[in-house]
Image (cartoon, rainbow, N blue to C red):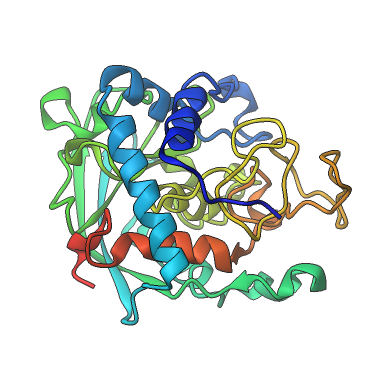
Amino acid sequence: MKKVILSAMAFLMLFSCQNDQTESTVAATNAMTKRACASQDVLAEQLKADPTLVLRMNQIEAFTQKTMLTNRLVNGKIVIPVVVNVLYRTAAENISDAQIQSQIDVLNEDYTATNADFSSTPAEFAGVAANVGITFELVQIKRKSTTKTSWGTRDAMKSTKKGGLDPTSPANTLNMWACTIGGGILGYAQFPGGSSATDGVVIDSNYFGLSSAASYPYNLGRTASHEVGHWMNLRHIWGDASCGNDLVADTPVHKTSNFGVPTYPYVSTCLPAHNEMTMNYMDYTDDRGMYMFTNGQKSRMTALFVSGGARAGFGI
């Protein structure tokens, strides 16, 4: 398991290095067979555009580590208000209220370990498998017709001036955008520390909530479970580097991203020999192949909501 106590210089090196360790963008024709999350790519571009972002993220990381070490975590129930912004050109993109609610339901199950497949957690990982204890409440759906065929990952969907919809009260509301992203990208999120004007999560409308069989193997709403994890300060489980560090102590080191539904046990090539946690939401496996967070990930997420935390505005 990994050590996660880093010096301030190590924080700077981490985020500076990851600026160059971006994910490959898969072609649109491969969107159905290989997960592609653009959160790290978007972070790299934001770091280039705003040199002060790395300082804010380093401060958030230092606060997170201190909070986890002192066990100064929230005791109350964390309920996240959610506004969903639907941008559509076609009827299919104008997803129904029921489909939107299904996504909220999936998030509530996955973040409280009430998802049916949580029981599939291997005995090896049962001791660290977590009920994160965070729930989500849909408070508003906003819809806007558009002529855009795709939005990309430059946050245009988050700006009314650019044809999208501005975020609603981002200091105390999770904004989600459902639209066609393009480029084979299923979704992306903004990490804590970024601009409030672009804060939130974007999910391609094909993969938002419990979608049709045509969206298989990403039709179970787990794209949002993954992206909301980023929004709550989780990194990819492989640390966006070969045998990298995701800053969580109880997740095994992964060689790289995993796809499909790997058969357990999946032995890592990172030494010493161990099994990878391919069923973790922060890997790249199919929706039916991911079904757990860890206690370490829970501590990292909930640290955001204490007094002085990056998302303390949610009033916990």
Q: In this view, does 109 lie above or below 278?
A: below
Instruction: Report whether residue 151 is seen.
Output: no
Q: In this view, does 236 lie to the left or right of 316?
A: right
Front in this rendered view, residue 153 or 40: 40
Assign the C terminus to one quadrant of the image: bottom left
Front in this rendered view, residue 191 or 176: 191
Q: How many labels does the image show?
A: 0
Q: In this view, does 140 lie to the left or right of 74?
A: left
Q: Quadrant of the rendered structure where residue 155 is?
A: top left
Assign the N terminus to one quadrant of the image: bottom right
The percent coordinates of residue 75 (x first, y second) are 34, 81
Q: In this view, does 190 lie above or below 109?
A: above
- Which residue shows up at 70% across the image and 31% down it? 242
- Which residue shows up at 64% across the image and 26% down it? 30
Front in this rendered view, residue 179 or 292: 292
Front in this rendered view, residue 218 or 50: 50
The percent coordinates of residue 73 (x first, y second) are 37, 72
Q: Is residue 98 left or right of residue 235?
A: left
Instruction: Report whether residue 57 is seen.
Output: yes
Q: Is residue 41 above or below residue 87?
A: above
The percent coordinates of residue 208 (x first, y second) are 44, 49
The percent coordinates of residue 148 (x first, y second) are 29, 22
Q: Quadrant of the rendered structure where residue 51 is?
A: top left
- Which residue shows up at 51% across the image and 27% down it? 18
- Which residue shows up at 31% across the image and 82% down it? 76
Q: In this view, does 6 lie to the left or right of 293?
A: left
